[in-house]
Image (spheres, grey):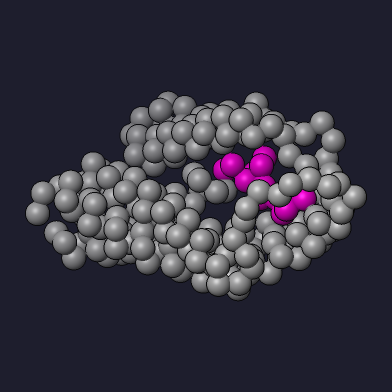
């Protein structure tokens, strides 16, 4: 089996299963909080009359669209993860895959969430473009910093890795001029917690599945 075919096959299987698992966890923990927050959002905007963009209806339609988006996202991350694992080489199985998944969780969720935590509907946020630039910078520097800390042998290089981890947070994420949320503080905190758990399940399962299928296809 060629390396490219192996990477794509592993990513397809791991991404599909991890995306479905993420959808299931979201339906239990995250979606009820979103629906509750949307009630507050709609109540605060009831005085404003404007045309709303199309969105899937609550129920099976919304769940199917969410599942499709999650699977597409999981496939993309699985391709990236399996490619990195292939380039790194060495022994890979579901146990080592869990470590790779944990690293992905740290890079793509934990680090950005320190300054830009998940927000419920109805939350006033900074400009989308500014947040996207900061998020991209944070993920790149965190990935580079972790790689240097874990794989570098010289202590000076490890120190550089630690510095890279802190740079995005020293710069700080873009913030709105006025902080406002239509939902209660308790609901916003519950949403952050639920989202953190859902993403942890997603990344750890994605890493474990990637390692499992990678070994099977060796």
Q: Residue at x 66, y 42 (%)?
A: 116
Could you tell whether 15 is left or right of 28 in the image? left
Left or right: 102 in relation to 85 = right
Q: Residue 218 in the image: x percent, y percent?
A: 14, 59
209, above or below 157, in the image: below
Residue 206 on the magenta span: no
Q: Nearer the viewer, residue 148 or 48?
A: 48
Between 20 and 63, the one nearer to me in the picture: 63
Q: Can residue 152 be seen at all in this image of the molecule? A: yes
Q: Quadrant of residue 61?
A: bottom right
Magenta residues (range): 111-123
Residue in the picture at 73% in, 53% down:
121
85 left or right, relative to 122: left
- Location of residue 71 in the rendering, given as x and y in whole percent from the top left corner: 42, 59
- Residue 26, image x, y percentages: 57, 66
Q: Is residue 93 above or below residue 6?
A: below
Of the 4 image quadrants, the one containing the N terminus is bottom left
Quadrant of residue 128 within the rendered picture: top right
Q: Between residue 74 and residue 209, name the one nearer to us.
A: 74
Instruction: Single out the residue that lies furthest toward the left.
Output: 1
Residue at 72% x, 54% y is 120
Say which residue appears at 77% left-offset and 50% top-offset.
122
Give the residue at the far right of this rendering. Answer: 47
Predominant SS of the magenta segment:
loop
The image shows residue 55 at horizontal and vertical percentages of 62, 56
């Amino acid at each position: 089996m060629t390396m490219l075919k192996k990477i794509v096959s592993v990513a397809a299987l791991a991404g599909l299963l991890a995306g479905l698992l993420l959808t299931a966890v979201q339906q239990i923990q995250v979606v009820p909080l979103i629906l509750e927050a949307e009630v507050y959002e709609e109540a605060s905007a009831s005085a404003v009359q404007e045309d709303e963009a199309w969105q899937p209806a609550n129920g099976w339609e919304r769940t199917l669209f969410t599942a499709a988006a999650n699977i597409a996202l999981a496939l993309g991350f699985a391709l990236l993860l399996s490619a990195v694992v292939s380039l790194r080489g060495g022994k890979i199985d579901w146990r080592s895959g869990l470590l790779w998944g944990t690293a992905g969780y740290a890079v793509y969720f934990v680090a950005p969430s320190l300054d830009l935590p998940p927000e419920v509907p109805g939350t006033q946020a900074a400009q989308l473009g500014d947040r996207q630039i900061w998020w991209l910078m944070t993920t790149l520097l965190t990935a580079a910093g972790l790689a240097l800390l874990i794989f570098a042998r010289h202590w000076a290089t490890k120190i550089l890795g630690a510095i890279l981890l802190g740079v995005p947070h020293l710069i700080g994420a873009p913030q709105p001029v006025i902080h406002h949320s239509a939902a209660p503080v308790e609901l916003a905190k519950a949403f952050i917690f639920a989202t953190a758990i859902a993403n942890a399940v997603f990344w750890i399962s994605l890493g474990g599945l990637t390692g499992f299928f990678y070994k099977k296809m060796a």
